[in-house]
């Protein structure tokens, strides 16, 4: 598909007209957001202020988090954040990109046709917008959207760029589809940890897993850069939150799950060196660093496995269990609730259809 005109500036990943490859220095920034579940307007207000702050520090390439319009616990309020393809969040990103002459990227839940996707938007100063739908939802994220199928690569006015979010960074298939095709990676994350309210026995039993999960989250951008050979911008959420935890697929019984975001908002170079970092424990804010655009020979060869790191059995079991529970919810409830919210948003209606409850408090 060719580039679309300025009157219809959405461009799917893998298309566009970019500049020749070669090292170039640009000031980059990544935003760490503490958002409000389901409150798109408030989250956009916070994002715009932090994007303005980053641009005021000279950044011309700015990453905002995955699910930039709302955090994503397993709660019905999340459905309110599902938007149609053309929406106030995209309009805001385009307006701010034009105002500051910068490129901005982040993801949001989008209803397109009869499905909901976790869609990354990479917006250029002239309004062109490149898209990437996350390939596989993570755990309870499956309750709100389904898998995408594009490669995440695009040509822009500053060169070849790639988009990936959260656990896409720890899957080898992400590197395979982008290796040698991009000069910088725009990423975001929404990485949580194990519950803090399930008692001392759980804390003691799963303490090592909690530590390893935190290690994975903190090192994912560097390890990804070492395998793909480009700088990586990662923007994160921060703060504590409560979610419902699904226990059995198709059964409306859940457990309260208190947790927090882990990892860091980071900018790393093509060899995986951290140039600047802000831990999620430090709260909302902006990090800024100068990066050199351009691909290098990867420092680490790609593994012949599905996951880049070795995931413990307990973490893989958690992954499969929550995937199964959440996919069932999406088929029965989540998809239609998201589509209804997007239809309401597209007509300007203030009404919102409450998702049928599959939870027991």
Image (spheres, rainbow, N blue to C red):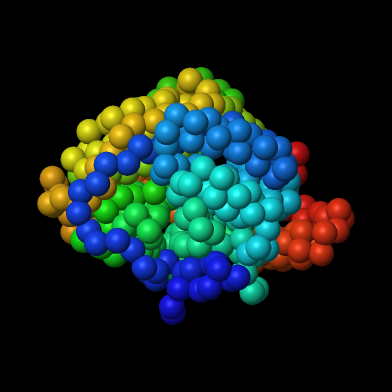
Vertical position of residue 179 compared to residue 196: above or below? below
Q: What is the residue that sits farthest to the bottom in this orientation?
A: 1
Which of 200 and 54 lies nearest the eye of the viewer?
A: 54
**Viewport quadrant of the N terminus:** bottom left
Q: Is residue 360 left or right of residue 5?
A: right
Residue 271 percent coordinates (x, y)? 18, 40
The part of the image, by quadrant, that contains residue 61 is top left
Residue at the image position 82 percent from the left and 59 percent from the top: 348
**Viewport quadrant of the C terminus:** top right
Q: Is residue 25 left or right of residue 322?
A: left
Residue 192 percent coordinates (x, y)? 49, 36
Q: In this orientation, does residue 255 appear?
A: no
Q: Is residue 104 left or right of residue 250?
A: left
Which of 310 and 176 lies nearest the eye of the viewer?
A: 176
Residue at the image position 48 percent from the left and 20 percent from the top: 282
Residue at the image position 81 percent from the left and 64 percent from the top: 347
Residue 193 percent coordinates (x, y)? 47, 34
Q: In this orientation, does residue 109 appear?
A: yes
Residue at the image position 37 percent from the left and 41 percent from the top: 233
Residue 281 percent coordinates (x, y)? 48, 22
The part of the image, by quadrant, that contains residue 222 is top left
Vertical position of residue 127 compared to residue 243: above or below? below
């Amino acid at each position: 598909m060719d580039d679309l005109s300025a009157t219809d500036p959405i461009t799917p990943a893998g298309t566009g007209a970019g500049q020749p490859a070669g090292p170039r220095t640009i000031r980059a920034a990544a935003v760490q957001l503490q958002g409000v579940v389901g409150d798109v307007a408030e989250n956009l207000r916070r994002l715009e202020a932090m994007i303005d702050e980053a641009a005021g520090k000279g950044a011309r390439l700015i990453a905002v988090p995955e699910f930039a319009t709302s955090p994503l616990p397993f709660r019905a309020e999340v459905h309110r954040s599902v938007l149609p393809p053309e929406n106030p969040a995209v309009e805001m990103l385009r307006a701010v990109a034009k105002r500051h002459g910068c490129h901005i990227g982040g993801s949001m839940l989008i209803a397109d046709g009869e499905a909901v996707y976790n869609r990354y938007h990479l917006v250029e100063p002239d309004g062109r917008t490149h898209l990437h739908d996350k390939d596989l939802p993570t755990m309870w994220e499956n309750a709100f959207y389904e898998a995408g199928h594009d490669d995440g690569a695009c040509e822009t006015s500053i060169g070849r760029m790639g988009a990936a979010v959260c656990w896409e960074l720890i899957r080898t298939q992400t590197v395979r589809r982008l290796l040698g095709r991009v000069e910088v990676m725009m990423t975001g994350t929404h990485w949580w940890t194990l519950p803090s309210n399930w008692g001392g026995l759980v804390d003691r039993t799963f303490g090592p897993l909690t530590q390893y999960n935190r290690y994975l989250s903190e090192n994912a951008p560097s390890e990804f850069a070492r395998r793909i050979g480009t700088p990586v911008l990662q923007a994160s959420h921060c703060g504590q939150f409560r979610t419902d935890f699904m226990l059995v697929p198709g059964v409306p019984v859940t457990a309260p799950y208190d947790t927090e975001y882990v990892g860091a908002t980071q900018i790393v170079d093509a060899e995986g060196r951290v140039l600047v970092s802000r831990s999620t424990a430090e709260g909302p804010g902006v990090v800024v660093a100068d990066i050199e655009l351009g691909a290098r020979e990867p420092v680490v060869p790609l593994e012949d496995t599905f996951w880049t790191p070795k995931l413990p059995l307990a973490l893989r079991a958690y992954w499969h269990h929550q995937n199964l529970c959440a996919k069932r919810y999406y088929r029965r409830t989540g998809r239609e609730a998201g589509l209804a919210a997007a239809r309401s948003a597209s007509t300007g209606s203030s009404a919102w259809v409450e998702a049928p409850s599959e939870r027991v408090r």
